[in-house]
Amino acid sequence: MGVLIKGGTIVTAERTYRGDIYTEGETIKAIGENLEVPSNTETVDAGGCYVMPGGIDPQTHMQLPFMGTSAVDDFYTGTTAMMTGGTTMLIDFVIPGPQVPLMEAYKTWRGWGEKSSADYSFHVAVTWWDDSVYNDMRTLATEYGVNSFKHFLAYKGAIMADDEILIKSFENAKDLGALVTIHAENGELVSHLQQKYLKEGMTGPEAHPLSRPPEVEGEATNRAIRIAEMIGVPVYIVHTSSKDALDAVVAARLRGQTVFSESLSQHLVIDDSVYRDKDWRTAAHHVMSPPFRPKKHQDALWAGIQSGMIQTTATDHCSFTTDQKMMGRDDFTKIPNGTGGLEDRMTILWDQGVNTGRLTMNQFVAVTSSNAAKIFNIYPKKGALMTGADADIIVWDPEATRTISAKTHHQKVDFNLFEGMNVKGVNRATLSRGEVTYLDGDVRAKRGAGRYINRPCNAPFVEATRKRHEYLQQKPVERS
């Protein structure tokens, strides 16, 4: 049975117009007015609403084993929650532990992903190096649809990649036509500052942002970008949280380098005052890395999105319960790093972006969906409303309001960073590959209905990056 979304205004990254959408099977069959459809077609009334591509969250961590525990939202609860909020696909991370083969870790995560109620894909982290890592990267890229490899410059003694690993991995990714992604914090400095503050008797969450100041993010961002520049590989900076990091991104893009940047919805609206909350548990629930910053950084991030210097928005959803956060009650370095946000990203971006005039509706679609689809080479199958595209569609009511709360959200975690926030702009309906999975409060998501999405290498910008690098290598050296 097909679905007709009728009476709405279609909004894409490029244009806004009136029209109906008819889906059949998993794809969009027709777009237009007065469409002729079979009599048994299910109709979704979109009157007074905007019809947009479903969101794509390019950075999540479902059931991630981390810091002695595991994130509480799994691939079923996480994907179900995200669809109620208007996101229809996520890209999660395979993160091998030290000396764990990449293919072994990938197969573990693929097994976990089979619970997904919505489509998903994986970045794969390079956390150590030998010949097997080199070979596994090639297998993943050529046989398993992985076109992005993650590198943590933080978490010393665990998953931190040093410069030697970066160089070898970047070279391999370049040859494969893949993208490298970066968690940009200087792990050596973070470790040094953590021990400094612990010795000074600062054991609570208030020490967390002090141990990871904007400077450590700015330095690591610049270093990763410069290494990528010398090797000639495109680079994507995850969760850009500070002006320091954004400045490095902007400088590189103005040089003509292929650099993409991502900001989290949380960093756009929450500042570092949360770490000084009188309730230890509330402060601890905000411990994530990079941490929340002083308000001036939020202005810079919004300007980065408006100007196109930041192309995507994500959540880095990695949720831990209050009991799990209590693991670091006497030592802030043992508080599991991570927050929720997967369910609320779209409405936060609409309420604080579109409603304030910071973003147009078309920019909203770009930074929540289409840009991620293009960067990770799944456009126009995803992130687009056109015939033949996957029928990942949302119906958005710009006048509806709701109050965000852990008591009513669908995420499994027992805390919501946006607790009590009144927002205007709410998702009414979600289609995932043509199936209505959410409609006016009725959750219809099905465990295991999600599909793994292959992402081919050699996106258009990859070839352009290669050509630019070759051209610059051939230019004669100018000496004064």
Image (cartoon, helix red, strand yellow):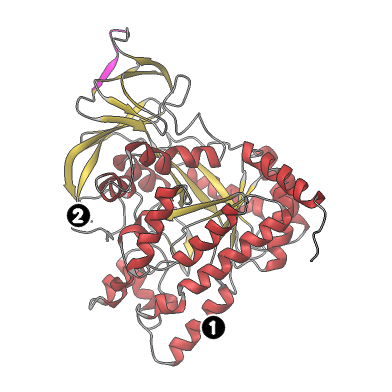
Question: Between marks 1 and 2, how big is the CA–CA gap?
Answer: 39 Å
Left-right relation of 380 to 327: right
Give the extent of the magenta segment. Answer: 38-44
Name the image quarter holding residue 248. bottom right
Q: Where is mark 1, residue-wise?
A: 192
Helix, strand or loop for disc 1: helix
Residue 25 visible in image: no
Helix, strand or loop for disc 2: loop
Quadrant occupied by the N terminus: top left
Left-right relation of 233 to 262: right
Q: Where is mark 2, residue-wise?
A: 407
Left-right relation of 11 to 290: left
| Above or below, 412 relative to 85 | below
Q: Which residue is drawn at 44% across and 42% down?
A: 115
Quadrant occupied by the C terminus: bottom right
Q: Position of residue 380 (x, y in %)?
A: 50, 29
Q: Do the residues labelled 1 and 2 touch (CB within 8 Å)?
A: no
Amino acid type, mark 2: Lys
